[in-house]
Amino acid sequence: MADTGDTPLIETTPPPAVSNLRSKFEQLAVQASSPSPKSPAVRSSVLPASPRPRVLEFADIISDAQRPTLRPISSASDLRSSSLRPSPSPVSDSPSAPSSPRLRPTPSSLHVPAPDPMKPTASLRKPPPPPPPHTRPSATPSPRPELNSTPARSATMSQFNGSVPHTSSPFEAESSRTPNHSLRTSPPRTSSATPPRVNGSLLVDSTARDVPRERRVPPPRPPRPSQHLDTQSTSSLDIRHEHAPSSESSLVSDHSSRSSSESDSLLIDVSPSPTLPPRPTKPPRPPVRAVPVRSATVQPVASSSSFIPPPLPARKTILDDNQNLQTHTSPTHQTSFSDEAPSPSDSVASTSTLPMPGRKAFGAHLPPPTRTIALGDKLPAPRRQQSGSSSESEDDDIKARIDLLPDSSRSSRRPPVLRCHTFDTNSIHVPAYTGVAAVAGHVVVVGTHHHLKIYNLSVQEKPLFNIDTRSIAGETKSKDNKVTCMEFRPAVNSEDRARYLWVGTKEGHLFEVDVANGVVSAVKFSAHASSVTHIFRHAGCMATVDEHGKVLVFSGDPSSGTDVSLSYSQPRIARIQDKQDFVKILNGQLWTSNRDVVTGPGGRPARGCAAVRIYDIFSPTFSSKNVAPSEPVGSVLSGASLPTMPGKVFLGHEGGHVTIWGVGANGEIHCEEVVKVSASDVLCLEGVNNRLWAGGRQGTIAAYDVAPRPWVMTNCWMAHQKLTVQSMTVDPWSMEKVERLCVYSIGRDERLYFWDGLLGVDWIDQELGKREKEYSSFRDMNVLIVSFNLDSAKPDQLVGSPENVNFLEDALRTANSPDIIAFGLQEVIDLESRKMAAKNFLLANKKNAADGGISQKVSTAYKKWFDRLVLAVRVAMPTETPYTVIHSESLVGLLSVIFIKVSERNSLKNIGITTVKRGMGGRYGNKGGIISRFVIDDSSLCFINCHLAAGQSHVRQRNADVAAMLEDKSLFPATDIMMEDPVAFVNGGDGSMVLDHEIVFLNGDMNYRIDLRRDVIINDIYAGNYHHLFSQDQLLKEMATNRGFRLRSFLEGPITFPPTYKYDRRSNTFDSSEKARSPAWCDRILWRSNDQSRVEQLDYRRYEVNVSDHRPVSSAFRMTVKSVHHELRAGVKAEVSGEWIGAQKKLLAEAMKYYQAQMMICGVRESSERGVVRGVSSSLDSF
């Protein structure tokens, strides 16, 4: 063929990766086809003249109604269909009547004569239909339609993935011979002959595969927005595919030459929406030269790489097999699909091809299920949604744990310091991790590396003896005897009790040291082959354990009065599992644990549960048993038994859990309960009197009353300056030596402290509180609290209705001459405004005015409301009783202003105010509270204005916000004066926490909702059925049912008004916005008093102010404050201290019986008990 010289419009060459995907049937059909001597199918047409050459234009030949549209096909479909492409039918030389309406003539694929330039022809190509199942398509050719013939409606044409209706057109015949894979075609390699051209378009034979490619075609561009076909610059081909997305309005097929002209790319529109009106006609163009073409199969568009297929375009939806697409035509010329039903072969072809596995088209997922709930139906479980609440950044598990912790609202924070020694323990240094200690009465022994330091705090604060363990055996035996553990051995004679100390070393040696004389009394070298990790005392026996699981049990003969001896007693050997993380004797048995995972109930693996193994090493018949906790908990770190609960064992775990173990009727040990007591690990656990003591990583020691449910934290104090409590031990020898029940702890601060195990200071304080009326005088004061969520309303908006105008004056007159007035406002500014949020964030460190007024640096909204409140108090209150501002503070959206009568100003002391941020994990103040406090006379008051986390289902976030404000231990500074005689504070507090104050008032937008449907809530409101709503009020439910809720000790008066949230502004209509929030009592006022009789609520109401989406509330109280007469109090305290001496005698006697029953103190039980009780009585009389 001669080169026409036109610029190629389509110049494509298929990469091998795509060419190899052609089916075997097509290859066989191409090889079987014979060359046709006649000219191939060429169509001729007379087209109007064009100012520039364009691709084959048919806009002037066909009408709008006949103009078809192109439909894109994804590359994924192309690749799939290439393997399922039916073989083309052979073409006959002469046209004949078709045996089937679906058959089309196929031109010869090889030799094509040169076309006649004077005879315009066009190639008519139609893709061969797929054969029916298990049959070959008929080879009978069908006649070609002429150019002037009327378009006939053909049967539904089968595509590679199915069948869709198809509309024939005069120009379709040529283009239909190629499978409709893609808009841009990539023919295979051509022969050496110059391929034919049509108006600059290069048409290449797809069967010529052995000729090198001219150039590669770049990958297709992604589809562009929908545009209508340009009838003057583009040609349309009717190409349809059943997987084309119906949601796409149009796709774009780009020209391979990447021309910048818009006419060089095909703009495809497959949406059925109306098209633009036809454009005006242009001058006629010269006819298009007819070019004979070979039979070619259009290949799928491939990427420029010969090995990597093109990227898959994003498709929004996948059409149903039976869903039809209509062409985009003008309203006056609507092209309809064929009315003929699809053939069976079409149906088979449409259902035989499945979507590509492993990839779902974008938007192909089914819509979420919907559910219609009728009136009265039960609601599904509420879905927890995220919002911009205060605890968004916190872990949900942490929020859940907060609700399960024991009640600590009334715990005492005063350290129970024991002052029973002549000298202090400040000089005793116990190195962290390497030091060990043993205590018996006044004697303290500290082991560090190869040194033993022996202290006697009744004699001096410096060590009496310093023993070097390296000199015990000389250089021949060991160069370094590093001390690893110590324990006092039992003795029958009272003089020998707590005198002889057994010491274990890293080398496996055992020493016995006489602490009274500072000498080594016995040695047993190489008793263990590895490091001795533990030494225990039980009854008249001693047991030593090494890290490899070897246990030596040394037994004495109590009947003959012979003590156990390291030199003469022959040990009995037992074996336990090596490398135990926890080892301790509890209730006469050796409890051990490591990090092995064991099976739980039902044989299922108890993930996270540590294996607990119990050995009866003191029994002649050695036995062991394995048990597992009932719930997944962390590794065992500590254990204890409680004197008031004999037979029970408490184990402390990682994560703050405590498991309770009991003995069943058949003697089996099982886990009875798992209690969450702390947010951190329980590193130390001891049962002391009737309390369970626990030490953690924050340096605090807490005492729990385990009898009630939930547990009650009675004491919690800082023991080791926020450093880890490494060990805590009860010294039973102290009951005989110093007449006290002593508990000593060692922390990472390398200090040793002694604590009163009987908590005598708290006992005295409680008795003093009961007799408070004997040394105090009382008077009443009136308090008024007003809470209002403004929703960024300004003071000048209080206009219109009388309720708006007279709101502040009406609220101030609800209380009879209040002595204290507290205003708590929320959302003073628009919390959604970024400008306001940034301004408040930058001015977070502002300072208030010296006179208590609001700072001038904050937003004018705070200043306007502050001035408006001052003016309202001045106008509403009598002139003879002026008021002054003692507190004013703002947080992002919050504003607190507290007034007090000028006559009461001199009675105030310890005034303080602070803020707690809860938004964004405590970094932002859009949620949180303003906390102010002061002491009037000798009573401490605390006022909290809060805005808690929003959201219908965010109950845990709100609970966490409350807990953060009430349990912050550093809100206010503590002074030494408060610690010495805190008459104004309760629970042993120093005023640094909220719950240290005698009376606490809490108001604000707490955001607790009602767990009912909106229509039910509104119906109950209109019917006045508030009691039904109270049963589903989240705040009341938490106070009644949540055992760890921090507001459980607070009170609220009866609610007699409708919900205060949420209304449309300037109306009494509940929220009619798109969100349609349910009404709720979000605005509340609560109080808490150490003595509930000291506070009485006089009024609790709401106001019909409609400038906000909330309604304001107010409450009036009458409270009682006290004035302490310190001389009288000192006399009463002396009496109470005397009563404590008698109570202490009984408690020590009971403790002595317990420790002897546990065989932790050995001897002749009857005589020793009588002697100890006698000694305790005489010593306590002198106390």
Image: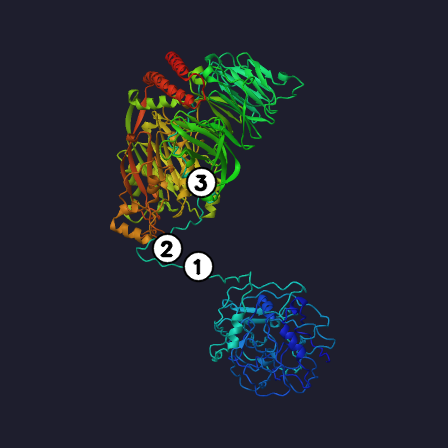
Q: Is residue 575 above or below residue 1164?
A: below
Q: Amino acid at mark 1?
A: Pro
* Label drawn at residue 631: 3
**Mark whose residue sits in front, 1 or 2:** 1
Q: Residue 842: image x %, image y %? A: 49, 41
Q: Earlier in the sequence, mark 1 or mark 3?
A: 1
| Left or right relative to 927: residue 144 | right
Q: Secondary structure at mark 3?
A: loop
| Left or right relative to 1148: residue 361 | right
Is the N terminus in the top left, top right, bottom left or bottom right quadrant?
Answer: bottom right
* Label drawn at residue 368: 1
Label 3 Cα crowd, 10 Å radius (few <14 / some 14-19 / many 20+): some
Q: Is residue 209 above or below residue 788?
A: below
How many angstroms separate mark 1 from mark 2 (CA)?
Answer: 24 Å
Q: Residue 1078: image x %, image y %? A: 34, 51
Label 1 Cα crowd, 10 Å radius (few <14 / some 14-19 / many 20+): few
Q: Is residue 991 above or below residue 946?
A: above
Q: Amino acid at mark 2?
A: Ser
Q: Is residue 21 above or below residue 646?
A: below
Q: Residue 780: image x %, image y %? A: 28, 28
How many angstroms separate mark 3 from mark 2 (CA)?
Answer: 46 Å
Q: Residue 445: image x %, image y %? A: 53, 18
Q: Secondary structure at mark 1?
A: loop
